[in-house]
Image (cartoon, rainbow, N blue to C red):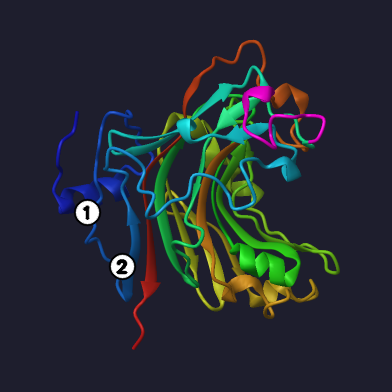
Amino acid sequence: MFSKINSLFFLILLVACSSDSKSPTEVIEEPIQTEIEGYRLVFHEAFNEIRLDTNKWNTHPWWGREHSGNGSVMYYADEAIRVQGGYLHIDVDRLEDQSTLPPPYNDTSTWPGVLDYISGSINTHMKFSFTHGIVKFRAKTAKEKGIWPAVWLIVPQQYTNVNDTWGPEIDILEMSHLYRDNPNVMGGYIYWTDKNQPQPSFHFKEEDHHLFANFTDNWHDYELRWTEDEIIFIFDNHELLRVNRDDFAGMGNPPHSDWIADVPMYLMINVAVGASWMEQDAMPDENTVFPMRDALLVDYIKVYQKIED
């Protein structure tokens, strides 16, 4: 087990071995004073306490404890979230009897979704949000069927209600079909849904998909660089996608500006199970072992913002 590693050695290790794996019991703390030139650290979570810090995090989305709008089939339960050994752990388990859930989720005759699993979700809604900056985190996912881990940014409830739209949303990590050597690459989505406008989205280049081979074998480092004029996705120090204002030409105008980079957003970390677009053979089956420990592990997450002159 690692104990403390000095700051300089850790930074060298992070750059040289960004895909190296580590066990859930090995705690390597990235020092809180790590700086990016021209930026200041405005949010830092290393999950080093004995429980989740509820001053920073909520344990379910503001809209409820499910994602039925996506066709997902899990209930977000507090017990699926663990902070242990310096990591955020999100577990997944079968839910044998939906009637044991609290109302309104316990009655399938009145609730629109069938909830077959328990999973976890945390977010900083109404506790921390930001506009423009750099998001960095380190995460590892399990090689299991049907799970849909994600780390993403989304606008607050008030924005959604006022504008009658979903999003904008920026998905940094979003993967499915993790039981395959080459899972579905979904991260990098930037989109909103408006009833009167088209839905733009952008995807990683197909020639970069080889970077995700054997994705679940290792820890990976993610970085989102979000400025007034462009959004850049970086995976293990490799730039995957760069989107700027010109890329939105002819796609319709979001309700807030000429593109989606000017809206406060908050952090969301979750593991969904299933989706309306997920094939049946990708769903958990009789060979899937439950409880599924560590469906998603997160080592740390940081947000930096530019220092104004």
SS class, disc 2: loop
Above or below, 37 against 202 in this view is below
* Residue 269 placement (x, y as % from top left): 50, 46
For this rendering, which residue is in front, 158 or 201? 158
Residue 239 placement, left or right of 182: left
Farthest bottom residue? Answer: 309
Residue 164: name its quadrant.
bottom right
Q: Quadrant of the C terminus?
A: bottom left
Q: Name the quadrant containing residue 34.
A: bottom left
Which numbered disc flags the more N-terminal residue, 1 or 2?
Answer: 1
Task: Tell me the quadrant of the picture where the N terminus can be found.
Answer: top left
Who's the residue at 69% across and 26% down the image?
282
Q: Secondary structure at mark 1?
A: loop
Furthest-front residue in this view: 103
Q: Which disc number belongs to residue 36?
A: 2
* Residue type (three-letter) at the residue carrying disc 2: Ile
Badges 1 and 2: C-beta atoms under 8 Å apart?
no
Q: Quadrant of residue 128?
A: bottom left
Residue found farthest to the right = 196
Q: Which residues are magenta?
A: 98-110
Pointer 2: residues within 10 angstroms few (<14), some, or many (20+)? few
Which of these two is toward me, 166 or 301?
166
Q: Please state the horizontal and vertical placement of residue 134, each as a whole percent of the image.
A: 43, 65
